[in-house]
Amino acid sequence: MSSFYENFIAETDNNNSTSEKGWSKRGITVNDTSVYTDYRLSKKHLGFALKQNVEELDHLLSSFDNKWQPLNGKKFWFTNYDDLLRGLRTIVWDKNVKSYLIDDKNSYLWSEIGLTSFLKREKVKENEEWPNIQFYEVNKLIADTNQFLILGNKNTIKRLNNNVINIFVVGIEQVLKNIDVAELYIKIKKEQREAEGGHLFPIFYTPSSQNRDILFILDNMRSNVMQYSKQRKALACLHCGRCNEVCPVFQCSGDKAYDNIFSGPIASVLLPHLETIDDYKFVSYACTLCGNCEKVCPVSLSLRDMIMENRKFFLEKGHLSLAEKQRVKKLHKTLQNRKKLNKVAILKSLKMRKMTTKELRRSRKLPKFEKQSFNQQYIKKLKENN
């Protein structure tokens, strides 16, 4: 574990060591190291690998499950966070747990399962010095080696060696095919963390029954997203938050509008399928399709295509009211008519007012139309240039 970590960090820190010389890790020789030292190339390869992992998710999870040995400790699968908390309650009662430690309190995963609230209800107190139980988010499962990739901190390794119960929690989508993909993942996360002024502490951990390790694997409606061929690629998200920083909708609404651990552009894709469509379809329609999120996404997710696929799905499967369907049909008819699109701005503004509800007009300003449409401006410029 340590030798691989040292080799990889040394390789990514040395920008001059490219394809002239290969280097070894776990008996595998890598001849082209440019993929690890070139950030853009790394992003491209990682994006492809993560999307491929999503497509092979069933196979990778089965592979990980089949290779698990009793010596690795205990492993449990949970369909939702309520089941997970019931399983955790059994451990707390059986082991008479009185104190806990969470390795990374900022992880979105603890918010998803409501861990701190649960521990408070069970009267388990936080104690960093002498905990009875420790919680770790597994950033990635490695399918071919049955290891955990944990992006911890400088104290994580020391804590892992404590003789206490270690609870590792991971979502079913966080599985990688092999160590090679994990290297790319670390490379990208390392660059991001350093850009934010921090440091990355990647740890490849092999679970052990001697260390009293217990793995919780959580579905929580992620398998529901897998039904949709285009939208499921959103599960390759790195949760880096860059899309939120450039999203005009998120900048206006903030986290509260989503009422979920997922927010911003990625929520516009996932939330209707992770929660209920009728309650969360609005997030897919709130998107302006500006494309800012795609420009900054480290793994080049086609979020606009996924959001458009959601809208199409809602219309086809009857999740829109009759009034909503009529407005969609009118808008579709208008957008296909070049004469209507080229009308003067005031007429288009009146048409827009007729197509929107009073509630919508009260809550936000309608967009102002240019005097000339894009088509008219384009033709005008062509004539000027000629």
Image: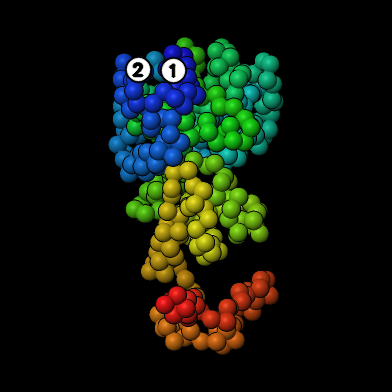
Q: Please report contact status of discs 2 and 1: CB closer than 8 Å, yes or no.
A: yes
The quarter of the picture where the C terminus appears is bottom left
**Placement of 70 over or under 135, stated as above or below:** above
Q: Tell me the distance, in whole angstroms, between the alpha carbons under discs 2 and 1.
A: 8 Å
**Placement of 121 over or under 249, stated as above or below:** above
Query: What residue type is disc 1 on?
Result: Asn
Residue 14 position, x and y percent, is 47, 23
Pointer 2 local density, CA inside 10 Å: few below 14, some 14–19, many at least 20 = few
Disc with the residue nearer the chain's start (2 vs 1): 1
The quarter of the picture where the N terminus appears is top left
Q: Nearer the viewer, residue 375 or 92?
A: 375
Give left or right: position of 180 versus 240: left
Q: Residue at x 70, y 25 (%)?
A: 125
Residue 193 position, x and y percent, is 57, 33
Q: Residue at x 47, y 11 (%)?
A: 210
Would you identify the image quadrant in which residue 148 lies? top left
- Please indicate, yes or no, whether residue 87 appears anywhere in the rendered image: no
Q: Nearer the viewer, residue 238 or 103?
A: 238
Q: Which mark is residue 297?
A: none
Residue that carries the numbered disc 2 in the rendered image? 24
Pointer 1 local density, CA inside 10 Å: few below 14, some 14–19, many at least 20 = few
Q: Residue at x 55, y 36 (%)?
A: 192
Residue 239 position, x and y percent, is 53, 42
